[in-house]
Amino acid sequence: MIYLLDTQILLWVLFDSKRLTQGELKILNDESNEIVCSSISIFEISLKYSIGKLQFFRTTPDKIPEALVKAGYKIKEVGVDVYSTFYRLPVDIHKDPFDRLLVWEAIQSNYTLLTRDQEIERYEKYGLKVG
């Protein structure tokens, strides 16, 4: 199965793995799963870092892609097809544009989104698979 990591899960994978549940660790460590990180998450992290909403100890956002690749994860560049069709995702469920883009990317790419955000789970009726 192909899993797309929510930005919070991605940060926990890299910096605070103790916060991951046993179920999340099982998914992440199962070699039959492909784990994908979105360029949307990289942008979100960089933006939040630049405005002081996110801080790191001994690293900066530009080091994150290399750390993800070293950990065996793939980074997916979001294509114009995701951006140009984004308007189709209803806005009545979740207002955060980064979360909504990740949801839409997961739906469009047929990925399972690994998240703990319960609001996001309400997008299942639109085709989202949640792990």
Image (cartoon, rainbow, N blue to C red):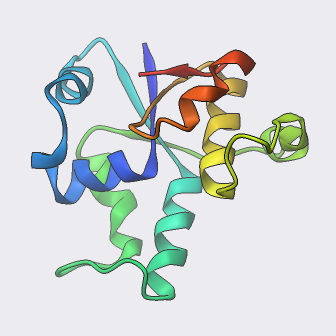
Image vertical order of residue 12 relative to residue 118, above or below: below
Residue 121: quarter of image: top right
How many numbered marks appear? 0
Q: Position of residue 2 (x, y in %)?
A: 46, 20
Instruction: Identify which residue is drawn at 32% across, 50% down.
Output: 68
Q: Position of residue 75 (x, y in %)?
A: 48, 45
Quadrant assignment for the N terminus: top left
Q: Position of residue 31 (x, y in %)?
A: 23, 17
Q: Nearer the viewer, residue 119 or 102?
A: 119
Image vertical order of residue 8 relative to residue 79, above or below: below
Instruction: Identify which residue is drawn at 80% across, 44% down.
Output: 91
Q: Nearer the viewer, residue 21 or 31?
A: 21
Q: Position of residue 8 (x, y in %)?
A: 38, 52
Left or right, 39 with respect to 53, comes to right
Left or right, 39 with respect to 88, comes to left
Residue 43: quarter of image: bottom right
Residue 59: quarter of image: bottom left
Instruction: Identify which residue is drawn at 28% across, 38% down.
Output: 72
Kindly give the residue lying farthest to the left in the view shown. Answer: 18
Instruction: Identify which residue is drawn at 74% across, 20% down.
Output: 126
Image vertical order of residue 124 relative to residue 41, above or below: above
Left or right, 116 with respect to 109, comes to left
Quadrant assignment for the C terminus: top left
